[in-house]
Image (tube, rainbow, N blue to C red):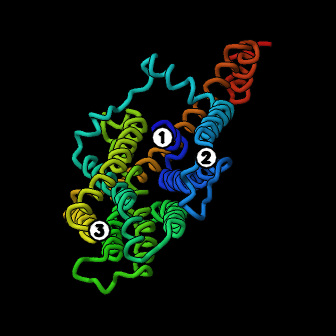
Amino acid sequence: MVAALVILADDNPDNFSSAVGIFESVGGIGMMIGPLVGSLLYSTSGNISLIHPSNITTGGNFGLPFFGAAGAEIVCLAGVMILLPRKYRKSRIEQGKNGDMTYVSVMDMMKKWRIILLVVVMSMSIASLTLLDPIFQPYASSSFNDTPLIIGLAFSGIVLVFSISSVVAGKIVEKTYAQVNVIVGLFLVSVAFALIGPLPWLPSLQTSTVSMIGLVLLAISLSFAIIPIPGEILLMGKGIKGGKGDVALAESSLTSAAYSAGAMIGPLLGSAVDDAAGFDWACLVAAAINFFLALLLLVMCSTRLLPWDVAKKKVKELERGRETRDIKLIKAEDAQERQRMENALYHESDPLLHSFTVNTQNLFSGDVENEVKI
């Protein structure tokens, strides 16, 4: 995941949010397909029924899903080795050894409190996505009498919605204000958890329809809360070490760490609160955390402590101005160099021709003291 984000940052510096959206979309599709393929491979032998879970006691082919996953990884490895440009296998190592490229470390990035805040926001967003994994199935089974098949299809549909909305969010983030997308996404996550729970003082909303609406809203809002963050971390890191260091590696490391931390925190937090107070209070805690983070970002943006998009626009304007200036300078230097080379070729390579031309010009200008030398 770290290497993939580094490659995305290098190849898509101007469209990084769209690239992250596609990256998250593909990951969501993999999360949706994986359990289905694994269960199908497992049920290829033995008295296994996907419809009647009471028949799972007589063994299936337990090793086949793992062998299939290993084979798929080998095929992907071969494809990466063939299709990946050679610059990602060689030039970075050589440049690092020759001292031509400097790298911004993760510790340098963590010294900026704005980056720490974004990492925390991303961790809690991922935690919101995984918080329901251990607790929603028992809740839906006891409250709505849903079968495991219905619950599995619901989760697959939510992952599909997240995959589609991630691509859309990536496109929207590039054309709008990134911090607005994050704040609105966090507020909508709070509303989604309030519907899924529902809130302890709104028992009338405890229906399967309201829960499904909340799950769909959760998937859409999380895509808008997560997708802008890697690009903003990358932008903030470019100011470190005078903007000369490579930030992609540190940014991808922080993003992967936030993703892993959120994937661990979510199930632990959800199961702990669910055991202590119930499903509705677990959703209330998740809603409160996201609401607090949204308010925190809103206050900081309103006081211009986090002028992300202002900085982004200034950076783009400076880059455009610098590129225009450099192009004009290169053209001017090329013209001067071309004239210098022509003069050098004219004067140095054929002195006889030069003498003839100069004296001819003097002759026709009335300077009869100079003779034409042929």
Residue appearing at x 40%, y 76% in the figure: 211
In the image, residue 64 above or below residue 129: above
Marks 1 and 3 sit apart, C-alpha to C-alpha, by 32 Å
* Disc 3: CA contacts within 10 A as few (<14), some (14-19) or many (>=20): many
The residue beneath circle 2 is 60
Three-letter amino acid code at disc 2?
A: Gly
Marks 3 and 2 sit apart, C-alpha to C-alpha, by 33 Å
* Closest to the observer, 317 or 9: 9
Three-letter amino acid code at disc 1?
A: Met
The residue beneath circle 1 is 1
Mark closest to the chain's N terminus, 3 or 2: 2
* Closest to the observer, 87 or 134: 134
* In the image, farthest residue toward the bottom: 204
* Closest to the observer, 166 or 251: 166
* Disc 2: CA contacts within 10 A as few (<14), some (14-19) or many (>=20): some
Task: Tell me residue 207's x, y (percent).
Answer: 39, 82
Marks 2 and 1 sit apart, C-alpha to C-alpha, by 32 Å
